Amino acid sequence: MSESATSGVREVTVASAFAGMRSVTPVVFKAGCPDCRGSFELRASALRLAIGATSRTTFYSFTCPDCGTSVRKPAGERIVELLTGGGVSTLRLHPTG
């Protein structure tokens, strides 16, 4: 970092700003298929989250990697928090506000 003699403001380069960062490990979620009873881990990109107006219309879905079945499961507040925090694509089924 350098300091400007006239302004006292430090300039930060991209390299110095990210110097202490390490690579990020991809988030994986444990899931299971109700049809084939398979148990597996899925990356965020393999899941979809739909947030509805009520808890009955809020769910997440994925395709079972073992049998190919489309799986849809209810998502309570904690599941929504974990999935959104892990980078799962989210679709709002109701207007906000």
Image (cartoon, helix red, strand yellow):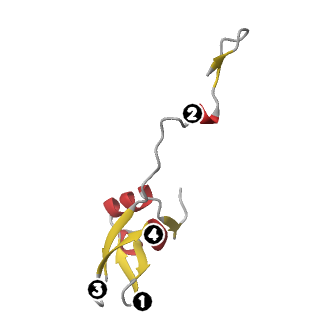
Q: Which mark is residue 17?
A: 2
Pointer 1 or 3: first along the chain: 3
In the displayed structure, 9 sits above or below 67; it is: above
| In the displayed structure image, the side of residue 13 where residue 23 appears, left or right | left
Q: How far, Cα to Cα, is label 2 from label 4?
A: 33 Å
Mark identifier at residue 34: 3
Q: Is residue 46 left or right of residue 37?
A: right
The span from disc 1 to disc 3 (Cα, nearest Å) is: 12 Å
Under circle 2, the secondary element is helix
Q: Amino acid at mark 2?
A: Ala
Amino acid identity at mark 4: Leu
Q: Quadrant of residue 42?
A: bottom left
Task: Identify residue for label 4.
Answer: 49
Measured as percent of width and height from the top left, residue 11 is found at 66, 23
Q: Nearer the viewer, residue 84 or 21?
A: 21
**Closer to the camera, 91 or 68?**
68
Name the side, left or right, on which 16 lies relative to 27: right
